[in-house]
Image: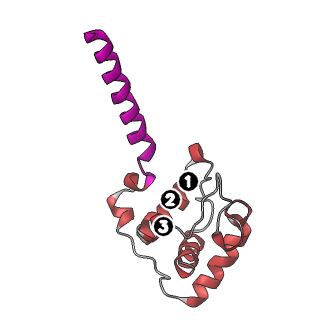
Amino acid sequence: MKRQTTTILLLLLSGTLALAAASHSHWERVPARDHARANPFAGNPAAAVAGERVYNDHCAQCHKAGARGDGGKHPSLRSEQLRAVTDGDLEWFLRQGDLAHGMPSWSSLPQAQRWQLVTYLRSIQ
């Protein structure tokens, strides 16, 4: 009986750890200096329009028109989770990507275009 109880407890513990790992957010990996960075284009309507062009050229094929996602692997970019992170977090994530989840790095885009994209994403929230 003791061995069976131990086995059950180990299974429960491993399940709990798996859930915790799955819910671990990539936002928690953003360095403090990047988290605190301010968007130089924040609130700039022209930058949002430019960011929409960047979005259409680089992001719409996965995240679809209007950043609504595809209901599957490619999430909506109008989510509560995105509203809760800083502009610096978003720019960092665009630069780093998350290949394990299918998100490429956009470090090849000029920094100004990444900030314009962040401005666009903020404008559609």
Q: Position of residue 14 (x, y in %)?
A: 38, 28
Q: Main secondary structure of the magenta part?
A: helix
Q: Is 5 in the magenta?
A: yes
Q: Residue at x 45, y 42 (%)?
A: 22
Q: CA distance from mark 1 to mark 2?
A: 5 Å
Q: CA distance from mark 2 to mark 3?
A: 11 Å
- Badge 2 amino acid: Phe
Q: Quadrant of residue 68?
A: bottom right
Around disc 3, counting alpha carbons within 10 Å, would you say few (fewer than 14), some (14 to 19), or many (20 or more)? some
Element marked by disc 1: loop
Disc 1, disc 2: CB below 8 Å?
yes
Q: Position of residue 42 (x, y in %)?
A: 47, 83
Taking the view exactly as shown, the residue that stands out farthest to the bottom is: 45
> In front here: 95 or 79?
79
- Mark toward the start of the polypeptide (1 vs 3): 3
> Which residue is tagged 2?
93
Q: CA distance from mark 1 to mark 3?
A: 15 Å
> Which residue is tagged 3?
82
Around disc 1, counting alpha carbons within 10 Å, would you say few (fewer than 14), some (14 to 19), or many (20 or more)? some
> Which residue is tagged 1?
97
Element marked by disc 2: helix
Q: Which residues are magenta?
A: 1-26
- Badge 1 amino acid: Gly
Q: Is 17 in the magenta?
A: yes
Around disc 2, counting alpha carbons within 10 Å, would you say few (fewer than 14), some (14 to 19), or many (20 or more)? many
In the image, is residue 34 above or below residue 10? Answer: below
Disc 2, disc 3: CB below 8 Å?
no
- Badge 3 amino acid: Leu
Q: Position of residue 28 (x, y in %)?
A: 37, 53
Which numbered mark, 1 or 3, is in the foreground of this view? 3
